[in-house]
Image (cartoon, grey):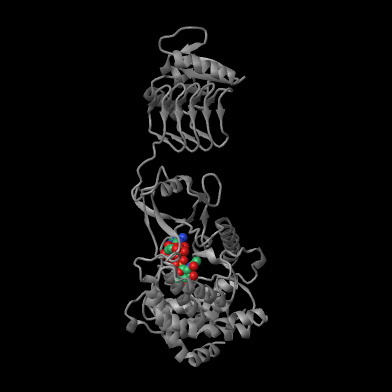
Amino acid sequence: MEQLLILGAGGLGRVAAETAEAAGYEVFFLDDAARGAKVVGRCMDYADLKDRFPRAIAAFGNNRLRLRWVNQLLEAGFEVPALVHPAALVSPSVKLGEGTIVLQGAIVNTACQVGQGCLINCGAIVDHDTRLEDGVHICLGAVIKANCCIKPLQKIEAGTVIFSTRRKIDGVDNLMLEDALYAFGFGNTCSYVKPFGAGHINETYAVYMPDENGEDELRYVLQRVNTHVFKRPKEVMENIIGVTEFLRRSIIAEGGDPDRETLSYIRTKAGDNFFEDSQGQPWRCYNFIADSVCYQAVERPEQFYESARSFGRFLKQLCDYPAETLHETIPRFHDTPNRYADFSRALERDVKDRASTCRAEIEFVQAHKDECGVLMDQLKTGELPLRVTHNDTKLNNILFDEATGKGLCIIDLDTIMPGLAASDFGDSIRFGASTAAEDEKDLSKVHFDIELFRLYAKGYLETAGSVLTSAEKKSLAWGAKLLTLECGMRFLTDYLQGDTYFKTTHPTHNLERARTQFKLVDEMEHQFEAMQAIVAEYC
Ligand code: ADP
Ligand code: GN1
Ligand code: MG
């Protein structure tokens, strides 16, 4: 039978002794006052008795004294086990610190973290994900609800109910965000959070954590996925998991760094790949890719060239991905004729009475109706193949390496689906080969820059050229024109519908965005032959 030395033979000492016996130990005491057959010395004799009793715990009711002795025993090299009564229920996922005692009838639920020298008394309930710091005493029958954090040496009196001891985290202004931070296990340590990025769809936050020196460091990117746009977030996550794991393997095979060159998602503490908040909204989390930069516009032409090489490489890397396993996260996403049909419906309904404010833009779209089908028709006849494409290839969906300036990691993988190479190519062009921002109000600043188009075509064909068919290469200039038209149509449709899809900051925001796209389409049309010639040059 294993022997256990108990320091302290008072009330708790005797309870601990019965607990230890029930758990199968033979018990001996050290105590300064008590006498008896089982008392083998005074507390200060502990060091001399280590060889005879290598296993010991401290059973003093006073939290400070108990914890001090636990530390002293550990320092002296004793094994200090956690002592759990067989009639207590402690979940297998719970971590109990050394010298912690859990008495009969106590329940410690899933994923709790219990520090050293704690005492969880009879009938106490500690619910899931709660953290008890060192030396805590949860007295008889107390209830600690889920996700609490009980500070070191605190005594929670008998029968008390602790509803929530969540810390106030700077930057958290709603319960859903707070719940998400706790679900991913950041609640107890996170320094602060703040809105992040300039995406039009998801709600993105930067999560700062203290590093080993206590300095705040941006460590995670937490996102609430927009369920108005992505109706089946579970499928979105399945696509992302499949693709990122596939990419990891090819990056490793190429000798790259899989932690920086593709996204790594974080599971919740419950092991799920996303967290559903109390309103049913999904949250997911990625590692922040350190020493990376994200651009909202092309600052130097080489950046655009590098982004082209990255998106081209991405297409090539996913060439052998089993496309049939991908979910269609947004049905008919780049089906331009279908987008035209959506536009016509929104115009017919004109629910916000806005059609009269954008007659010229409506006419522009209507004048292009017949062209909308050029790429989809070639897909239907089999001239163009379906590939695994990103479908949202704007410049702010790629991270650059801060040190080298090279394209590092493709992000925003929600729309990875089977699609056309021309769509990926075209979407990059409409955003990056413009001389102004997507929502520039002054149209005289907005121009299609054919030299940037040239650079992108060169970079894209350098990396993807070896897998693209000649029909696909010929389709690239069309991709540029149609994706720009399509995006403009989508902005205009959203304007007519009352801005329910894209994030906006003012009521005419979507209209302004639509106008820049149509200006670009117009300029592309005037240079379309030159665009096709440039693509041919790099084929
Ligand atoms: P949205 O669909 O709203 O565009 P994104 O996934 O593109 O959402 O994220 C928005 C922005 O957040 C990106 O443009 C980028 O600046 C930043 N971002 C997202 N994920 C990461 C990451 N893992 N590391 C660094 N920055 C990121
Ligand atoms: C949206 O999510 P974000 O901001 O990267 C949109 C794209 C548009 C783009 C226009 C899922 O991209 O399709 O081209 O805005 N994404 C989705 O800036 O609709
Ligand atoms: Mg994005």
Residue 81 placement (x, y as % from top left): 52, 27
Which residue is painted at 60% across and 60% down in the image?
A: 242
Which residue is painted at 52% across and 77% down in the image?
A: 340
Residue 286 placement (x, y as % from top left): 48, 56
Query: Is 258 on the left or on the right of 514, as rendered?
Result: right
Closest to the observer: 43 or 539? Answer: 539
Quadrant housing residue 288: bottom left
250 over 88 or under it: above or below: below
The answer, for residue 406, to whether it is visible in the render is no
Q: In which quarter of the image is the C terminus?
A: bottom right
Closest to the observer: 299 or 175? Answer: 175
7 over 525 or under it: above or below: above
The answer, for residue 247, to whether it is visible in the render is yes
Query: Is 284 on the left or on the right of 381, as rendered?
Result: left
472 over 206 or under it: above or below: below
Number of labels in the image equals: 0
Looking at the image, which residue sits at the far top? 36
Quadrant housing residue 396: bottom left
Residue 188 placement (x, y as % from top left): 41, 42
Query: Is 121 on the left or on the right of 504, as rendered?
Result: right
Closest to the observer: 39 or 308? Answer: 308
Residue 54 placement (x, y as % from top left): 53, 24
Q: In which quarter of the image is the N terminus?
A: top right
